[in-house]
Image (cartoon, helix red, strand yellow):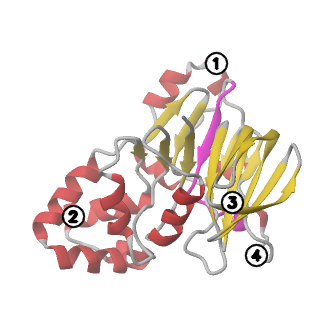
Amino acid sequence: MSSYVISDLHGCFEKFSKMLSTINFTDRDTLYILGDVIDRGPDGLKIIDFIVCKKNIVWIKGNHEELFEDYCETGDGSLWLYNGGKSTFEEISKRGLDFQNCLYEYIRKLPLYKVVDKFILVHGGLYLPKNYLSIHIDYILQEQDSSFVLWDRSGVHDERVLDNYTIICGHTPVQTITNDYKNPPAILHRNGRIFIDCGCCFKNSNVEILGHSEMRIENYRGLIEYTDQLVRVQTKIGQIRITGKHLQVDSYTNDDMKITGKIQNIEYQT
């Protein structure tokens, strides 16, 4: 039983599907998606069709889901279309108004954040008042404004530690944080925060997923590299790069490999 976090899929169903296959995602695992399932890529509704049928997938609202909400409430889709909503708009139009209304009601009720153990999962960021260290975490969360948690990027260069909690967020592609557009993007660990948007819909970008303590890889072809901090495995559909601490290839057969340890990043590359 493992827990994973991913964000900003932006309609890239094929990459999403390959990643789930890579980690051998089962009904015993849990996946948290930190918003922006739709827009830009061609298959946002295909991703939605998949995740709404899975009780073990938790969808947290992103700013692109809010843009769709605003369109449904006001009839003005200019901002949504400007921000990449054309592909989703066209998909929804094919399914009709009844589907659009049902999707609106579903998205409207999505949570803005989730607290899992000592991790706060949110799309954009959290507002921390100046005296946040003296305020209980429950009060801080209750006072969050939706526009802030969905759109904020102020925490990118102000990664303050929040009472031993780690904030995991998407929204801001790591390429724009590191200003590195040449090397493959990777999940970025900063003081008190983990940024996991690796620009899935960008050209030559990867899908990355934040793992936990165990993963299984089926139908692997070979072990390329193995240390206690890095494991690289060749599979039939590409290469998997697992980074973390105290990693171990716990067991393997001709068909299956089990990796344990403190898994930090799981990167799939074609």
Distance between the alpha carbons at the discs numbered 1 and 2: 40 Å
Residue 117, horizontal then vertical, whole percent:
57, 26
Q: Residue at x 66, y 29 (%)?
A: 162
- Residue 134 got which mark? 1
- Residue 181 got which mark? 4
Task: Read off the magenta span.
Answer: 164-176
**Mark 4 or mark 1, earlier in chain:** 1
Query: How busy is the neighbourhood of tag 3: few (under 14 within 10 Å), some, or many (20 plus)?
Result: many
Q: Is residue 7 above or below residue 216?
A: below
- Can residue 172 be seen in this snapshot? yes
Distance between the alpha carbons at the discs numbered 2 and 4: 36 Å
Badge 3 marks a residue whose secondary structure is strand
Q: Quadrant of the N terminus?
A: top right
Choose between 218 and 245: the one closer to the eye: 218
What amino acid is found at the position of numbered circle 2 in the picture? Cys
Q: Residue at x 65, y 68 (%)?
A: 206
Badge 2 marks a residue whose secondary structure is helix
What amino acid is found at the position of numbered circle 1 in the picture? Ser
Residue 265, horizontal then vertical, whole percent:
71, 51
Closer to the camera: disc 1 or disc 2?
Answer: 2
Distance between the alpha carbons at the discs numbered 3 and 1: 38 Å
